[in-house]
Image: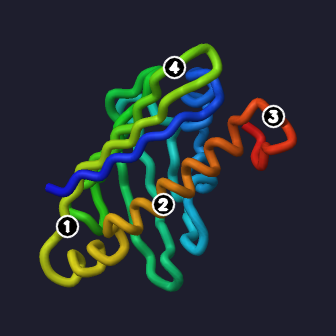
């Protein structure tokens, strides 16, 4: 199965990073244009909580149902229950590197389906697309959590 990893640091305490990612608005904030996210039923990450949403890639909807597990102060895992891909398990980990600095590590294991669905997922979730997505997420997370109010673009 393919694996995608991405790590970066943010100048914010671990508790603030965890709170930002637990906010039900985070998914919409962390999704780069031109993708639009339509939230259907988003529960804050708690053990067994479920998130249902649709990502719109232009006129093409990709429905997603994920279950959260391993939820704690240092992150969580969301696992695809129903969606375009055969498998998607995304682990978010937060590690304090000091009182005001946190390492965010993303680890995704995924598998494409066969047939036309697999062809579409290979285009939408190719490594360059995942790199773009997480580069955007790094930028938004840093801008959102910085301690410098002049560079904040979202309320935390």
Mark 2 crowd level (few <14, some 14–19, many ≥20, 10 Å Cα) = some
Q: Position of residue 142 (x, y in %)?
A: 64, 42
Left or right side of 91 for 3: left
Mark 1 crowd level (few <14, some 14–19, many ≥20, 10 Å Cα) = some
| Residue at the image position 41 percent from the left and 68 percent from the top | 129
Mark 3 crowd level (few <14, some 14–19, many ≥20, 10 Å Cα) = few
Q: Quick one: 5 or 81, which is closer to the camera?
A: 5
Q: Which residue is mark 2?
A: 133
Q: Which residue is mark 4?
A: 97
Q: Quick one: 115 or 32, which is closer to the camera?
A: 32
**Earlier along the polypeptide chain: callout 2 or callout 3?**
2
Left or right side of 145 for 105: left
Cα–Cα gap, marks 1 and 3: 41 Å
Cα–Cα gap, marks 4 and 2: 24 Å
Looking at the rendered image, the disc whose residue lies closer to the viewer, 2 or 3, is: 3
Q: Which residue is mark 3?
A: 148
Q: Secondary structure at mark 3?
A: loop
85 in relation to 103, above or below: below
Could you tell me which quadrant the N terminus lies in? bottom left
Looking at the rendered image, the disc whose residue lies closer to the viewer, 4 or 1, is: 4
Label disc, if present, on residue 112 of the rendered structure:
1
Q: Position of residue 118 (x, y in %)?
A: 21, 75
**Earlier along the polypeptide chain: callout 3 or callout 4?**
4
101 in relation to 114, above or below: above
Left or right side of 132 for 141: right
């Amino acid at each position: 199965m393919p694996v995608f990893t991405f790590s970066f640091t943010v100048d914010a305490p671990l508790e603030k990073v965890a709170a930002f990612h637990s906010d039900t608005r985070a998914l919409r904030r962390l999704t780069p244009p031109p993708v639009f996210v339509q939230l259907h039923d988003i529960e804050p990450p708690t053990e067994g909580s479920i998130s249902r949403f649709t990502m719109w890639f232009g006129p093409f909807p990709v429905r997603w149902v994920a279950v959260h597990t391993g939820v704690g102060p240092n992150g969580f895992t969301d696992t695809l229950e129903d969606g375009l891909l055969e498998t998607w398990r995304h682990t978010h980990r937060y590690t304090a590197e000091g009182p005001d600095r946190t390492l965010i590590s993303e680890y995704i294991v995924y598998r494409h389906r066969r047939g036309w669905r697999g062809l579409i997922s290979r285009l939408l979730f190719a490594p360059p697309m995942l790199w773009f997505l997480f580069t955007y997420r790094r930028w938004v997370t840093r801008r959102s959590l910085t301690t410098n109010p002049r560079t904040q673009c979202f309320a935390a």
